[in-house]
Image (spheres, grey):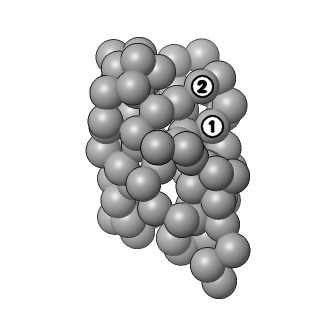
Amino acid sequence: MKITFEYTWPYERMMNDIYIAECPFCKSDNVLTSFKEEQMELAKEGVKQRLIMPCCHGKLTILNADDDYFYTDEKLRGQQ
């Protein structure tokens, strides 16, 4: 399965914390997630992970990750 840009969402890492600059669901700014280092390593290995956004309880299913983006099973860009 090829994942296109519409199915990605950027994140930032500060120390051991994972931030989302803007929630793809409610548009809240600088959202501190509860995503743990173990989950990040599993995501980078291609093991599916779930991220529940603390701002609105929207759910991201992360299929993969790299150093900049989460790759999801949901079209997050161009939906509004």
Residue 13 locus on image (x, y percent): 62, 26
Residue 7 locus on image (x, y percent): 57, 55
Vertical arrangement, residue 11 with respect to residue 55, above or below: above
What residue is drawn where x is 36% and y is 50%? 61
Mark 1 — residue? Answer: 69
What residue is drawn where x is 41% and y is 42%? 62
Dots 2 and 1: beta carbons under 8 Å?
yes
Amino acid type at circle 1 is Tyr
Query: Outermost residue toward the bottom?
Result: 80
What residue is drawn where x is 66% and y is 66%? 77
Amino acid type at circle 2 is Asp
The answer to which of 69 and 20 lies nearer the viewer is 69
Which disc, if any, is residue 66? 2
Residue 51 locus on image (x, y percent): 36, 46
The answer to which of 63 and 22 lies nearer the viewer is 63
Vertical arrangement, residue 24 with respect to residue 18, above or below: below
